[in-house]
Amino acid sequence: MESIKQIFRIGNGPSSSHTMGPKRAAEMFLARNREVDSFRVTLYGSLAATGRGHMTDVAIKSVLEPVAPLEIAWKPEVFLDFHPNGMLFESLKADGSVIQAWTVYSVGGGALASDDLSDPQPEHVYGMSTVSEIQQWCDKQGGSYWEYVQQCEGDEIWDYLEEVWRVMVDAVHHGLETEGIIPGGLGIRRKAGSYLIRANSYSGTMKSRGQVYAYALAVSEENATGGKIVTAPTCGSCGVLPAVLYQIKETRNFIDKRILRALATAGLFGNVVRTNASISGAEVGCQGEIGVACAMAAAAACQLFGGSPAQIEYAAEMGLEHHLGLTCDPVCGLVQIPCIERNAFAAARAMDANSYSTFSDGKHRVSFDKVVEVMKQTGHDLPSLYKETATGGLAKYMQEQDGSFKTF
């Protein structure tokens, strides 16, 4: 497996696969094609279907247009074989002839795949790629998941995770402080600040649950407006893990070192899914985004509350299992409905998975690795209209019920 840095990418929303990935691809293509007369970029499949709502064109234009004129072609009906998020970059001479062409795919979480990537390929730093293997290592060595991360990544991973946590906290704070309408045309107001005010008027479970909602909304609303966030594992699911960790830290006074260790564990579980299945909504539906985020947050919470490796694995398994089959059907192709609410609900479900696991001895019949296999197969069985194309499910229903809703 590659570094958990591939799971935790710092950048701007609203979409890791539709915004961060295409922007990075444009930067890489530009580095090799500066002496050109114009550019042409063709977007395929899911990128074309929901690209405007996800600001794909804005991200690409911000890189290429300052250098030369740019034409963007949209082909939502064409799905390339390798991945639904395909892009063709072309540099052109004045007569329209092609200087260089490059097909690249945005495969989720801001990562790219291509036969001809100019940047160095990520190094595989983990010798094990399943949770069952890693759990056996923990049992044999008497270690924890975060200690396996440290062994494989080296001590420098803690500096990276410290920056990840800082950006997460900043997103929570800024999201709570900011009010107003979220851009995109749906007329959705930011709710995080008001949710926190209401939560703090309660006590006990209602208070803690309301706080989790508020923190998840804060980060998700930041993402929806193009703010700075951390993929965990994607932009669309970036509010789940910060909400859980921030609420626990604020109410239980955990030191940052313990939070960073929980982040490492969360990243490890997310990395297993990324390696053996997918975290791309365009490939496997929202189960690969919100479902994986819930699993990561459940594992992190369980570790913080003293769970054994078996209990942590069980918490993560429940977080993913109970999101199996979740479709990705964003209204108007925006990361707003149902995405923002899903972050809040998944954060609460992660806390529930931790609680349920804590009551157990960690033994259960369905392993995390098996659920990852099932999620991959389920995602492949889902029709494309339920995988980030905004042509089915909730997106289609809203368009049919109200003519003001349209796919961008």
Image: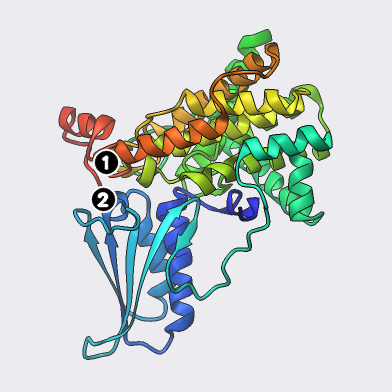
Q: Position of residue 21 (x, y in %)?
A: 46, 59
Q: Answer with the quarter of the image where residue 160 lies.
A: bottom right
Residue at the location (65% across, 15% down)?
355
**Would you say 317 lies left or right of 36 here?**
right
Q: Answer with the quarter of the image where residue 101 lies.
A: bottom left
Q: Position of residue 117 (x, y in %)?
A: 48, 72
Residue at the location (37% across, 50% down)?
54
Disc 1 marks a residue whose amino acid type is Ala
User: Which disc, if any, is residue 214?
Assistant: none
Q: Nearer the viewer, residue 152 or 64?
A: 152
**Numbered disc total:** 2
User: Which disc, if any, is residue 390?
Assistant: 1
Mark 1 or mark 2: which comes first in sequence? Answer: 2
Disc 1 to disc 2, C-alpha distance: 7 Å
Q: Position of residue 306 (x, y in %)?
A: 78, 23
Q: Secondary structure at mark 2?
A: helix
Q: Is residue 398 above or below residue 283?
A: above
User: Which disc, if any, is residue 49?
Assistant: 2
Q: Is residue 247 visible?
A: no
Disc 2 marks a residue whose amino acid type is Ala
Q: Nearer the viewer, residue 101 or 202?
A: 101
Residue at the location (60% across, 34% down)?
296
**Would you say 27 lies left or right of 170 here?**
left
